[in-house]
Image (cartoon, helix red, strand yellow):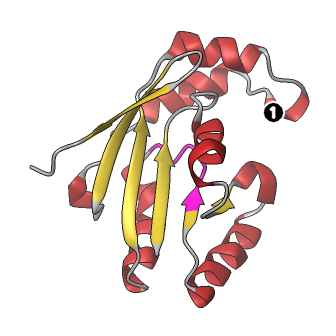
């Protein structure tokens, strides 16, 4: 059982990465889709009760925001894997500009998330950590050593 936590600013490619890598194997937990923390908690609880692997596909920019998922996953003996989307503000801004309706984030929102973004560390409780560098057409993934 795996708990995958994606971390990065809006439009950094997290959801596309999730769909490409985990669509057929993990439940996707995403606040854009679920809209409320209550619904998110229902899906998390269902994952734990059924021993289903899941991906938290939110920005998760701070240690404190990730702690909830890590603590719960550790309690249920999940392997905790993090993917940190290295910030590329210009590319994220371009992607965001192509979005329509509610999917488009205000520029202030992008900048706010970027400002508070904290790179995940093994000390938070991760079993594996990766850095993801996103380009227009692919993802380059590099394992972060556990020092």
What is the residue that sits farthest to the right in this orientation? Answer: 101
**In the image shown, does 58 or 80 lie closer to the viewer?**
80
Residue 32 magenta-highlighted: no
What is the residue that sits farthest to the bottom in this orientation? Answer: 49
Q: Is residue 66 above or below residue 48?
A: above
Left or right: residue 22 versus residue 107 is: left
Q: Which residue is mark 1?
A: 103
**In the image shown, does 20 or 84 lie closer to the viewer?**
20
What is the residue that sits farthest to the front in this orientation? Answer: 24
Magenta residue span: 55-61
Q: Dot 1: within a 10 Å radius of its alpha carbon, few (fewer than 14), some, or many (20 or more) residues? A: few
Left or right: residue 104 versus residue 90 is: right
Residue placed at 63% from the left, 82% from the top? 45
Residue 112: horizontal and vertical position, in percent?
Answer: 55, 28
What is the residue that sits farthest to the left in this orientation? Answer: 147
Residue 117: horizontal and vertical position, in percent?
Answer: 42, 35
Residue 60 magenta-highlighted: yes
Q: Is residue 91 above or below residue 114?
A: above
**In the image shown, does 2 or 67 lie closer to the viewer?**
2
Residue placed at 62% from the left, 42% from the top? 20
**In the image shown, does 5 or 22 lie closer to the viewer?**
22
The prevailing secondary structure element of the residues shown in magenta is loop
Left or right: residue 63 versus residue 7 is: left
Query: What number of labels is visible?
Result: 1
Q: Is residue 117 visible?
A: yes
Residue 89: horizontal and vertical position, in percent?
Answer: 52, 16
Q: Is residue 38 above or below residue 19?
A: below
Q: Secondary structure at mark 1?
A: helix
């Amino acid at each position: 059982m795996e708990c995958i936590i994606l971390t990065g600013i809006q439009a950094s490619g997290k959801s596309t990465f999730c769909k490409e890598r985990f669509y057929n194997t993990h439940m996707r937990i995403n606040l854009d889709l679920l809209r409320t923390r209550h619904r998110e908690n229902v899906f998390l609880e269902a994952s734990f009760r059924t021993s289903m692997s899941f991906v938290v596909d939110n920005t998760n920019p701070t240690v404190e925001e990730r702690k909830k998922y890590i603590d719960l996953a550790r309690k249920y003996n999940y392997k905790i894997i993090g993917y940190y989307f290295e910030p590329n503000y210009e590319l994220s801004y371009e992607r965001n500009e192509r979005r329509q309706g509610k999917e488009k984030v205000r520029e202030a929102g992008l900048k706010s998330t970027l400002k508070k973004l904290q790179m995940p560390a093994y000390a938070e409780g991760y079993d594996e950590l990766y850095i993801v560098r996103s380009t227009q057409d692919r993802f380059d993934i590099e394992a972060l050593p556990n020092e």
